[in-house]
Amino acid sequence: MEAARGKTPKKPAVKKGFPRNLKEPVGVYCRVRPLSFPDQECSCIEVISSTTVQFHPPEGYYKVNRTGNDKETQYSFKQVFGSYTTQQELFDTVAKPLVDDLIHGKNGLLFTYGVTGSGKTHTMTGSPGEAGLLPRCLKMIFNSIGPYQAKRYVFKSNDRNSMEIQCEVDALLERQKREATPNPKTPSAKRQVDPDFADIINVQECCKVDQVDEDCVYGVFVSYIEIYNNYIYDLLEEVPFDPIKTRLPQSKILREDKNHNMYVAGCTQVEVKSTEEAFEVFWRGQTKRRIANTHLNQESSRSHSVFNIKLVKAPLDADGDNVLQEKEHIMVSQLFLVDLAGSERTNRTKAEGNRLREAGNINQSLMKLRTCMEILRENQMYGMNKMVPYRDSKLTHLFKNYFDGEGKVRMIVCVNPKTTDYEENLQVMRFAEVTQEVEVTRAVDKTTYGLLSGRRFRNQIRGGLIGDEALVSEVGLQSFPPLPLCEILDINDEQTLPRLIESLEKRHQLRQMMTDEFTRQANAFSALLQEFENAVRNKENYSQGQLSEKERLISGQNLEIERLEKKNKTLEHKVEILEKTASIYEKDKRNLQQELETQNQQLQRHISEQCRLETRLQGMVAEMTTKWQKECDRRVAATQLEMQNQLWVKDEKLKQLKAIVTEPKMEKPQRPSRERDRVQDKAARRSASASPANAPPIGVRRRRSRSAGERWVDHKPASNVHNETVMQPQVARAITVSVPSEKALAKCEKYMLTHQELASDGEIETKLIKGDVYKTRGGGQAVQFTGIETLKQQSPGGCTHSRGVLLLFSNRKRSLSAAAALAQPDGLESELTDVETRCSMAVEMRAGSQLGPGYQHHAQPKRKKP
């Protein structure tokens, strides 16, 4: 089909030597239904020629749907039937060639497709006074093979989709057995036609196939199924009535016979002998078909109906009396008449519940049919080898063989020109466009049986020879001379008897002569007939020889074709493998390219990130360099100022010492008691804690430790910094080490670790970690820590010119704090009269006094946090 919007892709050129005539496209026809109310509705379809229709979009359609432009669209078909086309015209064009092929042993498939209410069922079944395609096909079949039908039950179907032949005796017994049943399934020709469909099958036109093989007998079998919700149901199956438990119909399955043809297993096949019987079977199944009321149609088909006409053909024997019993001589052909369910959007039907599920399954099966057609079209047009998904739907799986080349396929697209069906009709047209480009293999004529034609007529002539001979004898007696009068009235009459005897003798001689002539002519005719039979036999032998030679040649060619086909399949398999390998390599190549691109992108991002980090680090380095340069300058200036202050303090101390030394010596006091000594020692410690950090120790009196007999390991790491304070952590009888050793620990009972760290205010904080040394069972030494003392350099509050004090904080109860030392009475200070103590106290007490205007100038400023 060709549309005005877009052109169909050009078909590839046919290769040289390709058997183009063995394929033919699917015949797609279009039938336009007349409008129900021509005055009220507007048609959107116009028939412009015998092969083209034009679609006019309704007013406001593209404003609502916003799809494309509002131009008219044309579609081409094999033939278009307008709204005034009769059923007979449609039958003569579409269905009559299929019936002709059916009688000559070829298969056919005819289905109607369209939206609900477009006239599909009317086209297929018909209405009173207007018989559809189905009754017309039945009428044509029985008009053609009526005189040559086999007796009932001569042909018998089996469950493997094949036919068997019974002899006359078996067929007679089965007829008697079936006729004895109270309710026979097979309709009888003696019954009257049902008035419900009498008007439908009343076909006035007499259609008949011209060339029918008179030397064969025929049998017709029909079956009727429906595909509902993707399940197959037999409409002719008789379900036994059970008043207690209702039995639902059993779904059938599809199988494949030995010839790879699909069929419905267990489907009922009824042998019919007339059009009335066949349509009665169809009408009986039609009453079981699922039909429901929807918003679009009062009697909408909710399933796909498939009516199958199977024609069985078998030749007579050489004498023309009986049917050949060989199964290989049986020829079976089928014609499927399919009425598809309507395809429309579910929102238009306003269906709910079961109707909605039915509509969904109908659209699903039709979508699978469209998919199969599209893939077949792509495979044929572009040389592709895609797998056609026939098995996705029962509808496509059943007719798989027809699309693969088992017979002709015809489709009638029914459209309703209503404006409300415009969008659905566009979808139908697109599907018909794809279907029309699909090609199926053309069915070939099947081989003959090798018997002479005219066997039936010759048998009839033989059966009528006796009657013809009597007729000839009667004609010969009428040609004899008449007999004279035989009445004798006188006893002395001597002339009548001799005259009668003479007449009888003449008649006898004439009869003898005629008998001799007839015998001579019969002998001559027998000789001629024998000669003719000999000649015919010789011709038959010659024909058989020629035929056998041709068959040998054909078998050789078939073997060569099979060899070439196998070689072709092998090459196709290799090509397929190479294509798969190439596709795998292409896929790997694309993956590697994507991975390379991803890695390049990651590398570029990493490089940009490094550049950004490098720029940031350079900025941070420059900022830190500037910051630390300023800090170093500040610290250098502070250190220079501090060193100047220290020099000035030392000068002041020397001046004060010189002044103290030059003073006259006072009377030496008496030695205080031990208790007074301890008090003085405490006072000295208090004075030392209040002295400047840079003043050197001047004769500090140390108290004797209560652990004077114990030895210590004084662990001072080499990384420690001397804080230049007055009070330094010193332990008597200590072994000073930078790294503790087992030898040093073995000689001592106590252990002290000096640890330094930077406090939060920027000053150095010294911690004395003390512990006891124990001997272990293995002969080594272990240290158990007992306390931590913290030495921190601070500036006392209110002394703006002080150098700082060394405070001692401890978590041990026996250590003295700075607050306890300052709490001692002031009267004890007067007892410290020796020069060393007074010098130390003088330096410590006057460190914060006003020593002149120069001291304030050299004072250390308060350090700010960096």
Image: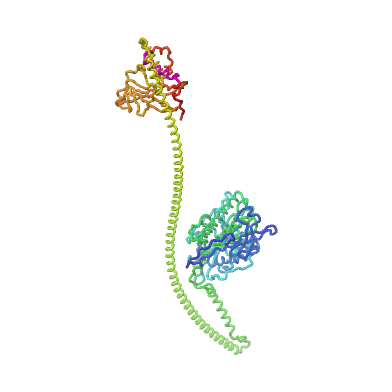
Closer to the camera in the image, 642 or 781: 642
Q: Overall secondary structure of the magenta stretch? A: helix
Q: Quadrant of the N terminus?
A: bottom right
Residue 216 relative to residue 55: left or right: left
> In the rendered structure, does residue 440 fall within the stretch colored magenta?
no
Left or right placement of residue 35 versus residue 714 in this view? right
Vertical relation: 131 (above or below) 776: below
Residue at 43% from the left image edge and 16% from the top image edge: 822
Closest to the observer, 109 or 563? 563
Q: 792 or 377, which is in the foreground? A: 792
Can you see residue 171?
Answer: no
User: Image height check: is 439 above or below 645?
Assistant: below
Q: Quadrant of residue 690?
A: top left
Q: Residue at x 45, y 35 (%)?
A: 626
Where's residue 408, x and y in %? 54, 64
Whole-percent x, y for residue 779 in the image: 29, 26
Magenta residue check for 846: yes
Residue situated furthest right in the rendering: 39
- In terms of depth relative to the viewer, which is nearer, 298 or 188? 298
Whether residue 262 is visible here, answered yes or no, is yes
Residue 245 vs 766, above or below: the answer is: below
Q: Which residues are magenta?
A: 833-852
Q: Which color scheme does this rendered protein use?
A: rainbow
Total numbered labels? 0
